[in-house]
Image (tube, rainbow, N blue to C red):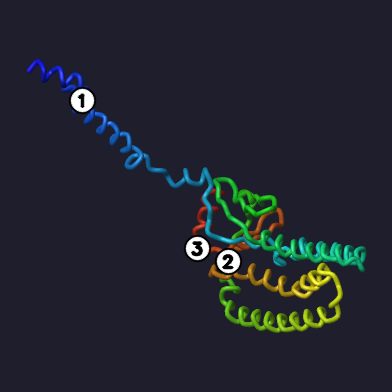
Amino acid sequence: MIFVKYFRKLMGWCPMKKSLQKEKKENWFCSFKPENESQLVPPSAGLEEGKVLKAQVSLSRDIGIIRIVFPAMIVFIILGICFYGNFFLDIFPFLIMYLAFLALILYNRNTVMLTPEKVIIRRHLFKPLVLKKDDILQTSASKNKNHSYRWPIRLLFFTALATQLFQVVEGIIRGLQLREAAPLSAKFSLFLGEFQIVAFLLTLYYIFELITPYKQTLKVTTRSDLNLEFYIEKPEELTSILKNETE
């Protein structure tokens, strides 16, 4: 028995080892009980951090064309006059227009975040738009006409796109024949110029598809003369939250 006790001590055996392991396991499982059972987050706590809504917001009726595309067209005309005859620099005016189309997409692609005091509309490459709930005057829900007439609009778009693509191919073939001895930059600017209208149509169609899936529209009128249209599946959910916070 003496040798048995000696070897047990040598191997690190302890009579309390199993009981200590059981206590550790019980304490380890108990430490997870509050997280799984008692630590339930109340609904109001989620709004403090910000709740992201599944929605899209139309910031203006012209979807930002006046603010983005028209200034880019003015710059395009000015640079086209300045760089006329320079085949290398002639590319930059077209690149500005394509960047304007990209900016138009990012302007309309947004994320809506709801907090207890305000609604934050986040946009890529643009400053977030903050709508304070105290500034809201009126809300009204209606059907999304883009969703109702989505198939006729899609048919009209694809018809216009097919017609324009046919004209683009003819213009490129004719232009390459006239610029057969021209440098590569001149041929590249020809492609950019011919596909410009097609790119603009695709941009408008992409913005259209952003708001088409939503059946309802919630129009919000503010004291600062800012009119927004929220494209959302359940407008009554957003309306009830806004009323509860503003009352």
Residue 74 in view of the camera:
no
Residue 196 image-quadrant placement: bottom right
Number of numbered discs overlaid on the protein picture:
3
Q: Position of residue 139 (x, y in %)?
A: 59, 60
Q: Position of residue 184 (x, y in %)?
A: 81, 69
Is 165 or 133 nearer to us in this picture? 165
Q: Is residue 84 left or right of residue 97?
A: right
Foreground label between 1 and 2: 1
Task: Name which residue lies at 55% across and 53% down.
Answer: 242
Q: Position of residue 110 (x, y in %)?
A: 62, 57
| Mark-to-mark CA distance, 2 and 3 | 9 Å
Task: Name which residue lies at 54% across and 48% down.
Answer: 245
Foreground label between 3 and 1: 1
Give the mark nearest the N terminus, 1 or 2.
1
Q: Amino acid at mark 1?
A: Lys
Q: Amino acid at mark 2?
A: Thr
What kind of element bears circle 1? helix
Mark 3: few/some/many CA within 10 Å (<14, 14-19, 20+): some
Task: Please identify the residue farthest to the left as the structure is shown.
Answer: 1
Task: Name which residue lies at 71% across and 57% down.
Answer: 225
Task: Look at mark 2 in the image and give the residue it sits on.
Answer: 217
What kind of element bears circle 3? loop
Q: Is residue 77 left or right of residue 140?
A: right
Q: Which numbered tag is attached to residue 234?
A: 3
Q: Is residue 16 above or below residue 32?
A: above
Residue 7 in view of the camera:
yes
What kind of element bears circle 2? strand
| Mark-to-mark CA distance, 3 and 1 | 59 Å
Is 5 or 48 nearer to us in this picture? 5
Task: Look at mark 1 in the image and give the residue it sits on.
Answer: 17
Q: Is residue 65 above or below residue 23?
A: below
| Mark-to-mark CA distance, 1 and 2 | 66 Å
